[in-house]
């Protein structure tokens, strides 16, 4: 897995990078082979925003989370991506039947 993490309008922290690494590992089960995950964390007004872009196996997914806590924003972004992946797999499964 190729993982890129960037921070805008804030300082980076090793604890946040490790949290994102651990959470991003859950995406491996949906992709066979290479997957590239790009995270961008930023502070906008009073919000903590996490953008996640996952690319692999001819699939391209994007999720974002906007809450008052970075960890909750990361979880929300991952939930959105996992929902997109499940929906895509269901479409493919129904198409073959």
Image (tube, rainbow, N blue to C red):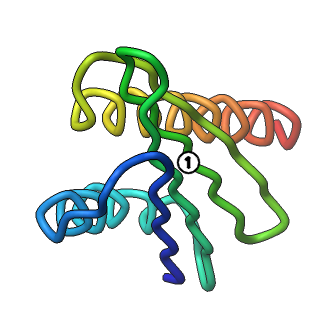
SS under mark 1: strand
Most foreground residue, 39 or 94: 39
Q: Position of residue 25 (x, y in %)?
A: 33, 66
Q: Residues within 10 Å of mark 1 (few under 14, many from 20)?
A: many
In the image, taking residue 12 as reference, residue 53 lies left or right, namely right
**Residue lying furthest left in this view?**
15
Task: State the residue position of label 1.
Answer: 52
In the image, taking residue 18 as reference, residue 5 lies left or right, namely right
Above or below: residue 10 compared with residue 5: above
Q: Residue at x 44, y 68 (%)?
A: 28
Above or below: residue 60 compared with residue 18: above
Q: Residue at x 44, y 17 (%)?
A: 45
Q: Position of residue 79 (x, y in %)?
A: 42, 30
Q: Which quarter of the figure is the C terminus placed in?
A: top right
Q: Residue at x 67, y 41 (%)?
A: 62
Most foreground residue, 78 or 51: 51
Q: Residue at x 71, y 64 (%)?
A: 55
Above or below: residue 21 compared with residue 96: below
In the image, taking residue 18 as reference, residue 42 lies left or right, namely right
């Amino acid at each position: 897995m190729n993982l890129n993490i960037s921070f805008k309008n804030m300082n980076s922290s090793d604890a946040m990078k490790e949290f994102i690494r651990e959470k991003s590992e859950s995406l491996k089960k949906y992709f066979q082979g290479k997957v590239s995950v790009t995270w961008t964390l930023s502070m906008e007004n009073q919000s903590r925003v996490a953008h996640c872009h996952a690319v692999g196996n001819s699939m391209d997914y994007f999720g974002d989370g906007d809450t008052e806590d970075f960890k909750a924003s990361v979880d929300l972004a991952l939930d959105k991506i996992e929902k997109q992946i499940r929906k895509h797999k269901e479409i493919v499964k129904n198409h073959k039947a």
